[in-house]
Amino acid sequence: MSLRCLLVDDCDLFLAAARDLLEREQITVVGVASCGAEAVRRSAEARPDVVLVDVNLGAESGLEVAGRLAGPSGDRPLVILTSTYSEDDFHDAIVGSRAVAFLPKSEVSGGAIRRAVAAARPGAGARP
């Protein structure tokens, strides 16, 4: 079964490239958003399994947006933070966030997302 993913980033080029890559790797991209309000709305509508959120989301903090999206149970998506910067640059903030993982944008792939989801919800798999 395919994971359902929402992409949240203020860079249209990254959104297009990530969508193309993930869909080729059997991740269903259910939507894209460029700001927090749009991400929350699209997440409620599309009910993704996982949301990739850019740490630097324009004028907004992706960390704050992640907190609005993430949930501790299966009814809310898992959040994975992304950035062009190193995880070391955000380590303390990432550890204190509700995100389950961090992926440098250069390492975003279907396999990396599946591994993060499996580590966060062992045996949960994708929704039917």
Image (cartoon, rainbow, N blue to C red):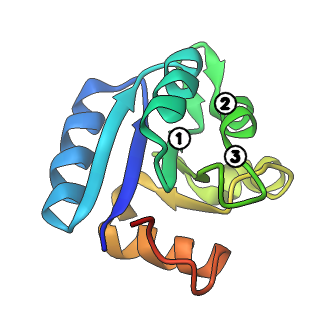
Where residue 1 sits in the image (x, y, percent)? 31, 74
| Label 2: element kind | helix
| Callout 1 crowding tier (Cα within 10 Å): few <14, some 14–19, many ≥20 | many
Q: Residue 127 bears which disc, if any?
A: none
Residue pointed to by mark 1: 53
Question: Viewer-proximal residue, 66 or 71?
Answer: 71
Query: Label 1 is placed on what type of residue?
Result: Val
Where is 99 relative to 114, above or below? above
Tell which circle, 1 or 2, labels the residue nearer the N-terminal end: 1
Tell which circle, 3 or 1, labels the residue nearer the N-terminal end: 1
Where is 87 relative to 11, above or below? below
Location of residue 91 by image quarter? bottom right
Tell which circle, 2 or 3, labels the residue nearer the N-terminal end: 2
Residue pointed to by mark 2: 65
Location of residue 7 by image quarter? top left
Where is 82 relative to 66, above or below? below
Residue at 23% across / 46% down in the picture? Answer: 19
Residue pointed to by mark 3: 70
* Disc 1 to disc 2: CB gap under 8 Å: yes
Left/right placement of residue 30 relative to residue 10 reads: left
| Callout 2 crowding tier (Cα within 10 Å): few <14, some 14–19, many ≥20 | many
Q: Looking at the figure, which quarter contains the C terminus? A: bottom left
Residue at 66% across / 38% down in the picture? Answer: 69
Location of residue 78 by image quarter? bottom right
* Disc 3 to disc 1: CB gap under 8 Å: no
